[in-house]
Image (tube, helix red, strand yellow):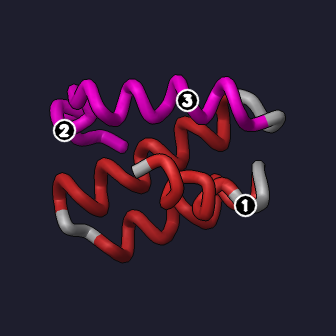
Amino acid sequence: MGESLYWLEDYPMAELAFQFAMRCPGGEQPVGFARLAQSVEKGRGDKKLAEEFWAEAEAAQPGIRELANEEV
């Protein structure tokens, strides 16, 4: 990702990532992908790129998308 990550500086997303880390046995990797997916989807409106991150998150931790929907 050669672009700036300024859009990740979002406290609610950081809080969500922390909550995921506490609840997901998969650890940080799926949490990071889920956070990226949500940030891209909500902050940039890029659903295609968000789906790529969701796919990575789900591959590492099945069910993380449903968990994300519960937390928001």
Mark 1 and mark 3: span between their CA atoms? 15 Å
Labels 2 and 1 touching (C-beta < 8 A): no
Query: Where does the magenta region start and end?
Result: 1-24
Main secondary-structure element of the magenta-colored stretch: helix
**Would you place residue 14 above or below residue 70 in this image?**
above
The image quadrant of residue 21 is top right
User: Which residue is depicted at the point 25% across and 69% down?
Assistant: 46
User: Which residue is depicted at the point 29% across and 32% down?
Assistant: 12
Q: In the rendered image, which quarter contains the N terminus?
A: top left
Q: Which residue does the numbered mark 1 point to in the structure image?
A: 63
Task: Give the structural element (helix, strand or loop) at label 1.
Answer: loop
Q: Amino acid at mark 2?
A: Trp
Mark sitting earlier along the chain (2/3): 2
Report the side of 31 relative to 24 (left or right): left
**Would you place residue 27 above or below residue 65 in this image?**
above
Q: Amino acid at mark 3?
A: Gln
Q: What is the x, y in percent for residue 7? A: 19, 38
- Disc assigned to residue 19: 3
Q: Which residue does the numbered mark 2 point to in the structure image?
A: 7
Q: Nearer the viewer, mark 2 or mark 3?
A: 3
Q: What is the x, y in percent for residue 28? A: 66, 28
Q: What is the x, y in percent for residue 26? A: 79, 37
Q: Residues within 10 Å of mark 1 (few under 14, many from 20)?
A: few
The image quadrant of residue 15 is top left
Report the side of 2 relative to 21 (left or right): left
User: Which residue is depicted at the point 55% across and 29% down?
Assistant: 19
Q: Amino acid at mark 1?
A: Gly
Mark 2 and mark 1: span between their CA atoms? 25 Å
